[in-house]
Image (cartoon, grey):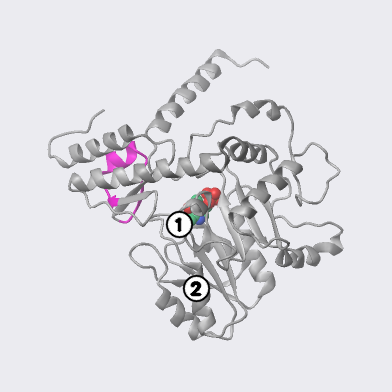
C-alpha cells in the first residue's frame, strides 16, 4: 500500500502547481475562500444520499437530514412557495438545468424551449438529450435576452406552450434575463401554458442579496431554479442545488411510481459530502457573512473596471455584476491568468477570494504585452 518515492514526488509537485494556478486564476466564476477541511473526518464514510432527499433510504450512511436543511435555506433565498417546493443537491449546475427542462418536457411534451444565444454551452446539449424542440433567441449586447425577438418568435408559434430557459448571469457577461418581464410578455399574449426555468448557476449564490435583486426567483415567476455549489458557494467539489415547484416533480415521480420507487432525481447515487460542505458554508457564514462576501466582491469588480478604464482599456460591467468584460488580451496573458474568452472579448470574475494585487498584476501584464518588444512580467 506504500507509494513509491517517485509517486510521492508527483503528488507534491501537483500540490505545488495547483497552489500556483490558484493564484493566477481570474477567469472562472469559482470561489476558493470557504475552507471545509474541518469536515475531513466525514470523508471516512461512503456518504450517499441516493434518491429523494425526503424519502428515507435503506442505506443509512447518508446526510439527508442536512440536505433538507440546505434545501430549505435555498428555498427561503429563492422565495419558493411554502408548501409547493422540492429540490435536491445535484452534481452541478448542468444537472439542475437538465432537471428543469425535464420537468418542463413532462408538463408540456409539445412545448418549445426558447433560450438566448448567450446561454451556457451545455443548454443545447441538454435539449438534445431530452429531444425538445428549441429556438435560439438573439441577445442584447450586454448578454441579456432580446425581448423583442422573444416576443416575435413566440407570437408566430402560439399553439406550442413556451418553455423559457432564462439566464440569471450569462457565462460571458453576467447578463441577467428579467423573469418578470418575460412573464408580462406572455401575459400580454394571453398564453397560459408556460414554463420558466432560471439558470442561476453563478448569480444564484448572491442574487438574493443584491439591491435591487434581479427578477430571478419563484416569486418573480420561475418554475425551477438551478444554482452551482462550486461557484459562488466555493465548494471544492463540483455540486449544485436544484429547486422546483413540487406539483411538477410529483408528476414525474408519479410517472415512474409503477417501477416501485420514488425516483425523482437524475443521478441515482449522490454525494452526501458536498451536502455537508454546503451546510457548513451556510452555518459558518450566516446571512451577514454572505452579504459581506458579496459586497467585497462587488467592490473589487468596481475597482477592476475603474483601474482598467483608467489604463485606457475598454472594460465594461453589467449593473451589480462581478464579471468585468474587456477586449481580449494577447494569448500569453490569457493563458497565464486563465482568462475565459469568447470571440474578441475576455473577462475576469471577481470572486470573494480575489485580491486587488492580482487585478493589478493582470493589468500590468496586459499593458506590457501591448508594448512592442517587451515581454510580460514573470
Ligand atoms: C457554470 C454555468 C453552468 C454550468 O454549471 P456547472 O455547475 O458547471 O455544471 C450553466 N449555466 C451557467 C450560466 C453557468 O455559468
**Disc 2 to disc 1: CB gap under 8 Å:** no
Observer-nearest residue: 50 or 127? 50
Q: Is mark 1 within 8 Å of ligand 1?
A: yes
Residue 165 on image: x %, y %: 53, 66
Residue 309 on image: x %, y %: 22, 48
- Residue at 73% x, 62% y is 83
Stretch in magenta: 326-343
Relative height, residue 10 to residue 137 (above, below): above
- Residue at 50% x, 21% y is 10
The C terminus, quarter of image: top left
Q: Which residue is mark 1?
A: 169
Q: Which residue is mark 2?
A: 182
Residue 3 falls in which quadrant of the image? top right
Residue 335 sits inside the magenta stretch: yes
The N terminus, quarter of image: top right
Residue 135 appears in the figure: no
Q: Is residue 303 left or right of residue 191?
A: left
Give me the disc on residue 206: none
Residue 331 falls in which quadrant of the image? top left
Observer-nearest residue: 271 or 35? 35
Q: Is residue 349 left or right of residue 65?
A: left
Secondary structure under badge 1?
A: loop
- Residue at 43% x, 32% y is 22
Residue 319 on image: x %, y %: 36, 57
Secondary structure under badge 2?
A: helix
What is the crowding at mark 1: few (fewer than 14 residues within 10 Å), some, or many (at least 20)? many
Residue 280 sits inside the magenta stretch: no
Relative height, residue 44 to residue 143 (above, below): above
Residue 15 on image: x %, y %: 49, 24
Amino acid at each position: 500500500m506504500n507509494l513509491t518515492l517517485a509517486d510521492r514526488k508527483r503528488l507534491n509537485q501537483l500540490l505545488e502547481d495547483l497552489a500556483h494556478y490558484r493564484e493566477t486564476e481570474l477567469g472562472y466564476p469559482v470561489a476558493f475562500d470557504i475552507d471545509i477541511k474541518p469536515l475531513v473526518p466525514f470523508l471516512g464514510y461512503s456518504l450517499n444520499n441516493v434518491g429523494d432527499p425526503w424519502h428515507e433510504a435503506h442505506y443509512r450512511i447518508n446526510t439527508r437530514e442536512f440536505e433538507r436543511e440546505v434545501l430549505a435555506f435555498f428555498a427561503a433565498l429563492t422565495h419558493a412557495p411554502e408548501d409547493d417546493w422540492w429540490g435536491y443537491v445535484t452534481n452541478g449546475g448542468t444537472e439542475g438545468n437538465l432537471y428543469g427542462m425535464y420537468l418542463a418536457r413532462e408538463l408540456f411534451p409539445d412545448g418549445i424551449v426558447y433560450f438566448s444565444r448567450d446561454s451556457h454551452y451545455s443548454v443545447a446539449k441538454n435539449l438534445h438529450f431530452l429531444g425538445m424542440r428549441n429556438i435560439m433567441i438573439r441577445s442584447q449586447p450586454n448578454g441579456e435576452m432580446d425581448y423583442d425577438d422573444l416576443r416575435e418568435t413566440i407570437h408566430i408559434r402560439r399553439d406550442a406552450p413556451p418553455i423559457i430557459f432564462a439566464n440569471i448571469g450569462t457565462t460571458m457577461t453576467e447578463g441577467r434575463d428579467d423573469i418578470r418581464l418575460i412573464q408580462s410578455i406572455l401575459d400580454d399574449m394571453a398564453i397560459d401554458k408556460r414554463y420558466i426555468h432560471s439558470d442561476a448557476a453563478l448569480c444564484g449564490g448572491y442574487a438574493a442579496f443584491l439591491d435591487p435583486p434581479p427578477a430571478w426567483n419563484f416569486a418573480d415567476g420561475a418554475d425551477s431554479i438551478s444554482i452551482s455549489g462550486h461557484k459562488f458557494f466555493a465548494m471544492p467539489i463540483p455540486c449544485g442545488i436544484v429547486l422546483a415547484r413540487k406539483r411538477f416533480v410529483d408528476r414525474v415521480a408519479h410517472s415512474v411510481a409503477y417501477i416501485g420507487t420514488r425516483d425523482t432525481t437524475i443521478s441515482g447515487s449522490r454525494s452526501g459530502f458536498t451536502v455537508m460542505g454546503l451546510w457548513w458554508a451556510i452555518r459558518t457564514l450566516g446571512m451577514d457573512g454572505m452579504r459581506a462576501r458579496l459586497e467585497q466582491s462587488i467592490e473589487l469588480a468596481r475597482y477592476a473596471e475603474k483601474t482598467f478604464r483608467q489604463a485606457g482599456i475598454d472594460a465594461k460591467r453589467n449593473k451589480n455584476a462581478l464579471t468585468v468584460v474587456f477586449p481580449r488580451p494577447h494569448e500569453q496573458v490569457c493563458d497565464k491568468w486563465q482568462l475565459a474568452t469568447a470571440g474578441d472579448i475576455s473577462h475576469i470574475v471577481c470572486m470573494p477570494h480575489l485580491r486587488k494585487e492580482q487585478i493589478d498584476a493582470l493589468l500590468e501584464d496586459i499593458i506590457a504585452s501591448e508594448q512592442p518588444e517587451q515581454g510580460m512580467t514573470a
